[in-house]
Image: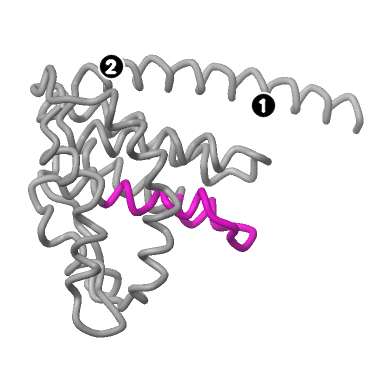
Amino acid sequence: MNPGHERRTTRILADTVAAQEGEFITLDALLAPLHARAFGCLLLLLAIPNFIPAPLGIGGIMGSMIIVLGLQMLIGMEQPWMPRRLRFRPLRCTSVRKFLDRTLPVLQRLERMCKPRLQSLTDRPVSIVTGLFLTLLGILLALPIPFTNYLFGVFMLAYAIALIERDGALLIGLWVLSVAVFVLAAIFSSVVLDAMAKMF
């Protein structure tokens, strides 16, 4: 893998924050250097809170935002749409740096598996498959299922890196794993519902 490309993927967000003058940076400014890969980079940012101690219900918030992102890919949008209020909301630079530092080891492990392959799978119309899976994963993340935030966070990071690196081979693997997760979630839900029915 080209070392420059690896650095561009793992550090470009941190470099953007470091170059920011002042205490705050907006999401719009953070994503500006990555406009060609905005879906992957925005997904990366949405995955990060799953790896840090956060208030109860953060999964519901992040899951809802990932659902919106997945639906935008599903209908074929080339760039993610965000409300102006969200795009220009100030983020504290120190907090963003901490988030990125915490997830950097996971990102670097994922990157070692990635390179541009089967790139047509990251483009329309095939990208609607990724949009569908992200929408369904967002729904699962939004549900109050205990101890799943980290697991789904890893999934989101992997999807983000695959989109940023234009790695269609990794996407195929993620599609297969996503189907397995959905099947297990359906089985688990069925068991829980049966148990509840017997209790009441």
Task: Report the predominant secondary structure element of the magenta stretch.
Answer: helix
Disc 1 marks which residue? 189
| Residue stretch rendered in magenta on the structure | 42-62
Disc 2 marks which residue? 172
Say whether residue 111 is magenta: no
Q: Which amino acid does label 2 sit on?
A: Ile
Q: Position of residue 117 (x, y in %)?
A: 13, 19
The single residue placed furthest to the right in the displayed view is 199
Instruction: Tell me the distance, in whole angstroms, between the alpha carbons under discs 1 and 2.
Output: 26 Å
Which residue is painted at 67% across and 23% down in the image?
A: 188
Say whether residue 43 is magenta: yes
- Label 1 crowding class (10 Å Cα cut-off): few <14, some 14-19, many 20+? few
Q: In this view, does 124 lie above or below 80?
A: above
Which residue is painted at 69% across and 21% down in the image?
A: 190
Say whether residue 127 is left or right of residue 193.
Answer: left
Quadrant, the N terminus: top left
Kind of element beneath mark 1: helix
User: In the figure, residue 177 lies in which quadrant?
Assistant: top left
Which residue is painted at 75% across and 27% down in the image?
A: 192
